[in-house]
Image (cartoon, rainbow, N blue to C red):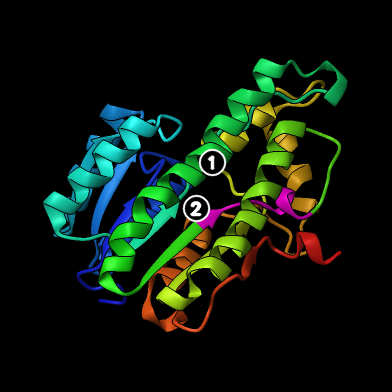
Amino acid sequence: MGRVQDKVIIVTGGAAGLGEAASKLLAKEGAKVAVTDIQDDAGKQIVKEIENEGGIAKFWHLDTSKEKEVAEVFSSVISEYGSIDVLVNNAGIEGVNKPPHEVTLEEWQEVMDVNVNGVFLCTKYAIPAMKKAGKGSIINLSSIYGIVGAADAPPYHASKGAVRLMSKNDATFYAKNDIRVNSVHPGFIWTSMVERFAEKQEGVTVEEFRSELAKAHPIGKVGEPDDIAYGILYLASDESKFVTGSELIIDGGYTAQ
C-alpha cells in the first residue's frame, strides 16, 4: 500500500479496460486520480467505486484529440489537486481492420487524432506542471503492435509505433528535468477493445478467437487488465526513478518468439 501515496495522476481513457484497472489500482496505492474519458457515466461510476473503497478520485470529461479540452482539463486538475505528478496516456481506439490500400484518409486520421495527437497534446500540457514540480512520470500506452507487425489494422500499428518513439524522444528531451517518459506494450489483454476486434473477425466466434489468441502467447493465456495496471503502477512510483526511455513489454511472451 502507498506506492504512489499523494501523487496526482491523470489517466486518460480511464473509464474502461486498462484505464479503469489503472485508475483503481493507483487510487488503492494512495494516488489522487483524475479519471478522464469521453464516457461520462462510466467514468463517474469508476470514481464512485474508488471513493467507496476509500480512495481519492474525480472525473473530467476529456476528448484527448481536442487541444482546448486538454488545456482546460489539465488546468482544472491542477486547480483541484495542486499539481500533476504522473500522466498515463492510455486513451486509444483500434480503428479499421483492412489492407492499407483500402483505408480511407478519414479512417487513418481518426486513429491518429486519438492515439498519436492525444498523446502529444496531453504530454504538452502536463510538462509545464512537472517542470515546475521538478520531476514527473509520463507513461504512454503503446502495444506489441508498436514493435511487431501482424498484417492487420494498419492505422493502429502505425499509431502505436509512433507512440513508442515519441516516448523515447520525449525521454531525452526532459531527462534533465527529472521527468521520465516510458512506454508500456501490452500483448492481448481481454478488454472491450479486444472483444470488439474479435467480433469483427470472419468465420470464428468470440470464444474461438480468444482460445486461438491464448495459444499465440507462450504463457498460454490472454492477459487481464490488472497485468498492465501493475506495470503502470511501477512506472508511476519512485521505484522506477532510474527508468526512462524504456519499453515495458507485458505480453505473455508474444514478442519473444
Q: Where is 175 relative to 255, above or below?
A: below
Q: Secondary structure at mark 1?
A: loop
User: Residue 161 in the image: x percent, y percent?
Assistant: 71, 49
Q: Amino acid at mark 2?
A: Pro
In front: 239, or 108? 108
Question: Which residue carries the number 1 mark?
Answer: 191
Q: Secondary structure at mark 2?
A: helix
In front: 147, or 229? 147
Q: Is residue 128 left or right of residue 53?
A: right
State the mark number for residue 135.
Answer: none
Residue at the spot x=26%, y=70% of the render? 133
Q: Quadrant of residue 170?
A: bottom right
Magenta includes 133? no
Q: Is residue 19 left or right of residue 79?
A: right
Q: What is the distance, in whole Å, between disc 1 and disc 2 at their CAs? A: 7 Å
Q: Is residue 212 left or right of residue 7?
A: right
The reply to whether dot 1 and dot 2 touch (C-beta < 8 Å) is yes
User: Residue 207 in the image: x percent, y percent?
Assistant: 68, 34
The magenta span reads 140-147
Residue 124 in view: yes
- Quadrant the C terminus occupies: bottom right
Residue at the spot x=31%, y=32% of the render? 69
Q: Is residue 120 left or right of residue 35?
A: right
Q: Where is 118 relative to 107, above or below?
A: below
Question: Which residue carries the number 2 mark?
Answer: 225
